[in-house]
Image: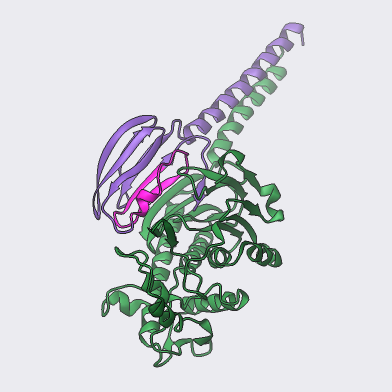
Chain colours: A green, B purple
């Protein structure tokens, strides 16, 4: 063999092997963290070429979530520093009295909440606080409220009496006794804010799991879509479907974790703000849309609405998809999800 | 180039491709968890890693008191916990990589990790 051919072969050999090593070198590194926040476990996995830079981004994202959590915390000890830092506490304490100046993020959450209150004709309402308190979900002793007390609490519900002044940056509950409860929106909003922080740190691939509220950024590090299972609402350790998602969120509201039973009847924590009783049309509703804050709101609203109306609402909105399991066990989803959903027929609820 | 040279060149090229594939594949394999396992954390720190399948009851000290974790083959569940609401007990058995059990009052998290996993489960 002459030396020219030998040189070419040697160059090709080295190029191929180095090429493979280079591909490896460019594969992203993962940094993952988790923290108990907003009454759940939040985990963040992020990917990039520089581990230290990714770690810095993840830590900053957690700091952002902690900041939002402090603003939205509805149950800190009265008179504590946490109560003083919580916009929700201060607005609740001043109900029926005077407007309270709130942080920009609190205002953004309340504007979003009021918009969807109007859009859903009250199926979503952050002033449901007095009724939630009466049921006692999350405490040691949840109970079915007496009808008279429920009626009195319901009279204090209604976002038409939540007055927001964008110019002055104030929020005001018109009637004494009204209470904000941001449980169905703050986690999603905080998740979306955390994602923006990751982006500002140059991170293009990440997954935030805030107690089952999922937000993915970019594509999976394996390449292609992220595989997000939807929990089977009536079976341990099962999923009813797998969503193939890129750069979007998936948030589920279900009746299967926070509930109690009286005389064989299940009372879960997702209340219809118009009746004061647990909503009964669905067992689980998953909303897929880009913004995790909107997904959080819509998963609750669509759980409360009758299934047909929930599907119609999602269908009327651009970029909003729904997977809904009715109380009859029937699974339905938005037609536009067809190419992104893998239904597990053997694991129907 | 003689016939022998051509064969030699072909062998060297195949060898190069083989080396590259092995190199890349090995790194890919190293990047993924090779077996299914349950990772248990308390207050953010990993306190136990259970290779699955396994069997037994494990006692954990959570923030709200002791908790018992039961492993049966590839499945794992919270069997006892001292927390209001008992939401972690209601999460029942999990068995699929990507699934988790979370006890907020106890600050306990159990994640199943493994190959071919779901990235997460919305619930």
Q: Is residue A48 visible?
A: no
> Number of labelled discs?
0
Q: Residue furthest bottom?
A: A97
Using the image as rendered, state which of residue B88 and residue A103 is in the foreground. B88
Magenta segment boundaries in residue numbering: B86-111
Residue B64: x percent and y percent? 24, 55
Using the image as rendered, state which of residue B33 and residue A201 is in the foreground. B33
Q: Is residue A42 left or right of residue A199?
A: left
Q: Is residue A226 left or right of residue B97?
A: right
Residue lying at 47% horizontally and 39% vertically, measured from the top left:
B97
Residue lying at 42% horizontally and 40% vertically, measured from the top left:
B112
Residue B102, magenta (yes or no): yes
Residue A200: x percent and y percent? 52, 63
Q: Residue furthest front?
A: A263
- Vertical placement of residue B7 versus A309, above or below: above
Picture quarter with the N terminus of chain B: top right
User: Image quarter for residue A348?
Assistant: top right
Residue A250: x percent and y percent? 56, 56
Residue A239: x percent and y percent? 53, 44
- Vertical placement of residue A319 versus B9, above or below: below
Residue B43, magenta (yes or no): no
User: Image quarter for residue A53?
Assistant: bottom left
Q: Is residue A343 visible?
A: yes
- Vertical placement of residue A177 versus A54, above or below: below
- Vertical placement of residue A240 versus A167, above or below: above
Q: Is residue A72 left or right of residue A322?
A: left
Using the image as rendered, state which of residue B76 and residue A63 is in the foreground. B76
Q: Is residue A273 left or right of residue B46?
A: right
């Amino acid at each position: 063999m002459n030396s020219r051919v030998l040189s070419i072969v040697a160059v090709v050999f080295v190029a191929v092997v180095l090429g493979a090593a280079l591909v490896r070198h460019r594969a992203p590194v993962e940094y993952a963290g988790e923290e108990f926040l907003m009454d759940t476990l939040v985990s963040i996995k992020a990917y990039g070429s520089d581990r230290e830079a990714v770690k810095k981004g993840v830590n900053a994202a957690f700091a952002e979530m902690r900041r939002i959590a402090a603003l939205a915390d509805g149950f800190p000890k009265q008179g504590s520093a946490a109560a003083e830092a919580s916009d929700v506490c201060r607005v609740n304490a001043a109900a029926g009295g005077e407007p309270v100046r709130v942080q920009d993020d609190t205002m953004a959450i309340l504007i979003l909440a009021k918009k969807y209150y109007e859009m859903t004709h009250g199926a979503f309402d952050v002033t449901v606080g007095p009724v939630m308190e009466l049921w006692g979900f999350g405490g040691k002793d949840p109970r079915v409220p007496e009808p008279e007390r429920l009626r009195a609490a319901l009279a204090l519900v209604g976002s038409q009496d939540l007055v927001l002044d964008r110019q002055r940056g104030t929020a005001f509950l018109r009637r004494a006794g009204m209470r904000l409860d941001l449980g169905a929106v703050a986690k999603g909003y905080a998740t979306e804010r955390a994602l923006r922080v990751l982006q500002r740190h140059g991170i293009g691939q990440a997954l935030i799991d805030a107690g089952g509220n999922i937000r993915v950024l970019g594509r999976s590090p394996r390449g292609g879509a992220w595989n997000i299972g939807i929990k089977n609402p009536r079976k341990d350790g099962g999923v009813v479907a797998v969503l193939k998602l890129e750069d979007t969120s998936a948030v589920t509201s279900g009746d299967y974790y926070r509930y109690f039973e009286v005389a064989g009847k299940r009372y879960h924590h997702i209340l219809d703000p118009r009746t004061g009783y647990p909503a009964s049309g669905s067992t689980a509703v998953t909303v897929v849309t880009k913004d995790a804050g909107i997904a959080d709101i819509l998963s609750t609203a669509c759980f409360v609405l009758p299934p047909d109306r929930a599907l119609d609402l999602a269908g009327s909105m651009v970029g909003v998809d729904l997977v809904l399991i009715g109380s009859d066990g029937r699974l339905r989803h938005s037609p536009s999800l067809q190419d992104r959903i893998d239904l597990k027929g053997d694991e129907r609820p | 180039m003689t016939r022998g040279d051509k064969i030699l060149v072909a062998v060297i090229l195949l060898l190069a491709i083989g080396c590259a594939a092995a190199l890349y594949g090995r790194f890919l394999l190293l990047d993924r968890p090779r077996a299914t396992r349950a990772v248990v954390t308390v207050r953010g720190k990993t306190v136990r890693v259970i290779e699955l399948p396994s069997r037994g009851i494990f006692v954990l000290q959570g923030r709200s008191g002791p908790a018992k974790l039961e492993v049966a083959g590839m499945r794992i569940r919270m069997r006892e916990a001292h927390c209001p609401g008992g939401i972690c007990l209601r999460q029942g058995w999990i068995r699929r990589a990507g699934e988790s059990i979370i006890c907020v009052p106890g600050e306990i998290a159990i994640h199943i990790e493994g190959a071919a996993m779901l990235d997460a489960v919305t619930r």
